[in-house]
Image: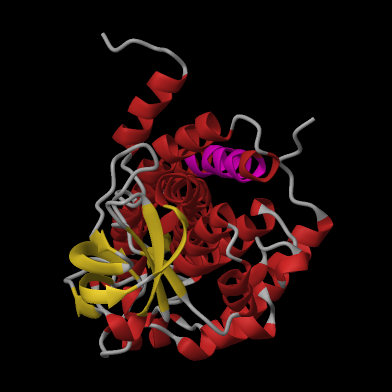
Amino acid sequence: MTDLLYSEEEEALRSAVRDLLTDHCAPADVISRTESGTPHDRALWKLLAEGMGLAGLLVPEAQGGQGASAREAAVVLEELGRAVAPVPYLTSAVVATEALLACGDEELLGRLAAGRTIGALAVGLHSAPQAPFATVRADNGVLRGELTGIADAAVADVLLVPADDGGLYAVTADAVTVTPQVSLDLTRPLATVTLAGAAGRRVGDAAPAVRRALRAAAGLLASEQLGVADWALTETVRYLKERKQFNRPVGGFQALKHRLAQLWLEIVSLRAAARAAADALASGEDADITVAVAQAYAAPVAVHAAEEALQLHGGIGMTWEHPAHLYLKRAKADSIAYGTAGAHRSALAALADLQAP
């Protein structure tokens, strides 16, 4: 039977990741990075990827990884979401890695698993698993074209580029032009990737690799959204216990209790949906349906939690110095990442053979 509870190993992994992020990813530091020209925290990434071996969680041991599953990766993403950590874990250790697992390119996969190389799938962050994706022109391994909305392209060492000949090509970062785009979520910046005669090495077929990568991304993104929502609720409850009006804690007012209770119910349901998606990706059973259910539910809850956190913190929540805006931006950006809730509901209807009214 499916067990959605966290195992002892998963809880130990959570504790280790949370301790590391507590020491090296303070909210004030994240805000400072968003104001700089280098939003990615390479030092933190090195600690996570090389120090803890988290970049290779999804890679089999025979190929240089940890041989874990999507359940463990989901725990890591919960903690990264709770800290809005500016690292390319989702894009490199999940999306690019899943694409390479579908292709079977062991050499590049081993480099990503070791954390020495950062990869990015050159497919727009907005792309849903079921939707068409943009490609570039390919002529004997020479690639030309432009792709937009590529998450973490600025920090990637290698880009996995889908081409019109049906292939997926590995292209080194120095062979392309990466132009930053204006991003709502400054902790996961987007960029336009331009290829003007870039040489690429074909690593496999694009369609199955991209579909697999985007499905894993959508399913595990729900765990990141759970982390965002859980932080929002926890910090809001803590603040309302301390903040006083009329000589009593604000959290004692019944109207606010009701809002927090409703939010708690939504987050508990989100945790169940996210855990189910991670377990389905790990086992391969009913993954398409379970991922669609999770993403159809996760985005509205994460956004609602972040909005409540900002509003219930009052004036301090509206300031740039308070991290609430980081979580709201991450939640809003995640709500259109790898397919909107509406796109996943439509996909779910098709998978369950439910006709629209």
Q: Position of residue 137 (x, y in %)?
A: 22, 59
- Which residue extends farthest right? 8
Q: Is residue 124 placed above or below 83 in the rendered structure?
A: above
Q: Position of residue 235 (x, y in %)?
A: 48, 64
Question: Does residue 332 appear left or right of residue 254 in this picture?
Answer: left
Q: Residue at x 26, y 79 (%)?
A: 176
Q: Nearer the viewer, residue 96 or 30?
A: 96
Q: Residue at x 53, y 52 (%)?
A: 223
Colour scheme shown: secondary structure
Q: Is residue 46 placed above or below 112 in the rendered structure?
A: below
Q: Residue at x 26, y 54 (%)?
A: 135
For the question of whether residue 135 can be seen, the reply is yes
Q: Residue at x 30, y 56 (%)?
A: 163
Q: Give the magenta part as a residue range.
A: 266-279
Give the quadrant of the C terminus. top left
Q: Is residue 187 placed above or below 101 in the rendered structure?
A: below
Main SS class of the magenta portion in the image: helix
Give the quadrant of the N terminus. top right
Q: Nearer the viewer, residue 178 or 240?
A: 178
Question: Does residue 342 appear left or right of residue 182 in this picture?
Answer: right
Q: Tell me which corner region of the image, top left, top right, bottom left or bottom right, holds residue 350.
A: top left
For the question of whether residue 31 can be seen, the reply is no
Q: Position of residue 147 (x, y in %)?
A: 22, 63
Q: Position of residue 11 (x, y in %)?
A: 75, 61
Q: Is residue 72 placed above or below 113 in the rendered structure?
A: above
- Which residue extends farthest front? 140
